[in-house]
Amino acid sequence: MTQILLWLFFLTNQTLEKSISQKICQPNQQQSIYSLNDFTLTKPFNLNSNDLTAKSVLVKEVGGQTLYDSNADQRRPIASLSKLMTALISVQLYKPNQIFTINQKTVNEYPGDIARLTVGEKLTRDDLLQLALIGSSNNAAYALAQGLGVDKFVQIMNSQAKSLGMNQTAYYEPTGLDPGNQSTLDNLYRLADLILRDYPQIFAFSREDSFSVGPNSVINIDYLLPYYKNIIIGSKTGYIGRASGENLILILKFKKSPFIFVGLLDSQNRDKDGEYIIKKLQDYYE
């Protein structure tokens, strides 16, 4: 499975997208995604801090070396990056075709939400996941938590974080709108690592251009994706105004690289920061 996954990244972009979206690894898979012996680059990787606006930055090979670290251990509001944990718990708890009926509380909780959910509407787990991950729908994330009960769901989010060693992480609700939802990039790397290894469908959903189900339609709000879709394996954005700044997580794969985690917290321009890092990584690996 390890060799098959890596081989997919050498195919055409169209084949890549199809393959990633269809591939689902089994939970608790023990084998590594790649062998670190395959990557022996020793030249320095340099970023100019003056060219970055984010207050916290982490660039790290998944399972390998840290390429760049600036305040990656500082705890900050993570906004909609919270939805990665919401997605993880949902995949662990619910079956893909489990039906969720939207109720009045869900609709009232976040009026004017991008997904425009209506009372009585029925959606599957995967419908809600795609609305939450692609368009960052708060109502979709909330509906997923309601399937168990929001308080219990959030409790499990925090328990999962603790089990991953995310000791600087706290979740108060499933969407990220509460600035109390905080973490560090060091902690978020642990979460992204687990998702990539055991639940890659979450990242496959996150890189789709758009998603529609019935009257609900969202477009991907990671604006780097159309330009770098051949190397972006997964992503999630987050923003709640001045409380968080602009946040971004990217999982990247270049032809001659392992998987790369890129994390930004409290950026003034996550797209500019992210593109700067992508171009530096391109030079480093290619």
Image: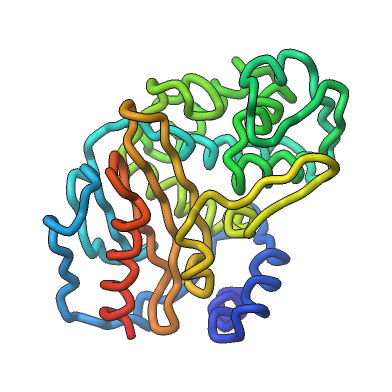
Task: Give how far across and how far down residue 280 sits, in percent.
Answer: 26, 72
In the image, what residue occupies the spot 68% across and 64% down? 21
Measured as percent of width and height from the top left, residue 218 is found at 67, 46
Instruction: Between residue 77 and residue 222, name the one nearer to us.
Output: 222
- Locate residue 207, reporting x and y percent: 58, 59
- Residue 28 seen in render: no
Where, quadrant-wise, is the C terminus in this rendering? bottom left
Residue 107, quarter of picture = top right
Residue at the image position 38 percent from the left and 21 percent from the top:
180
Q: Give above or below for 11 relative to 132.
A: below
The answer, for residue 188, to whether it is visible in the render is yes
What is the quadrant of the N terminus in the image?
bottom right
Nearer to us in this view, 120 or 114? 114
Q: Quadrant of residue 12?
A: bottom right
Tell which residue pokes out farthest to the front in this image: 112
Q: Residue at x 28, y 44 (%)?
A: 267
Give the image quarter of residue 217.
Answer: top right
- Left or right of 122: which side holds 197? left
The colour scheme applied to this rendered structure is rainbow
In percent of width and height, residue 158 lies at: 48, 27
Quick check: 90 left or right of 270? right
Vertical side of 183 occupied by 211: above or below:
below
The residue nearer to you, when weighing 198 against 205, is 205
Point 42% across, 77% down: residue: 254
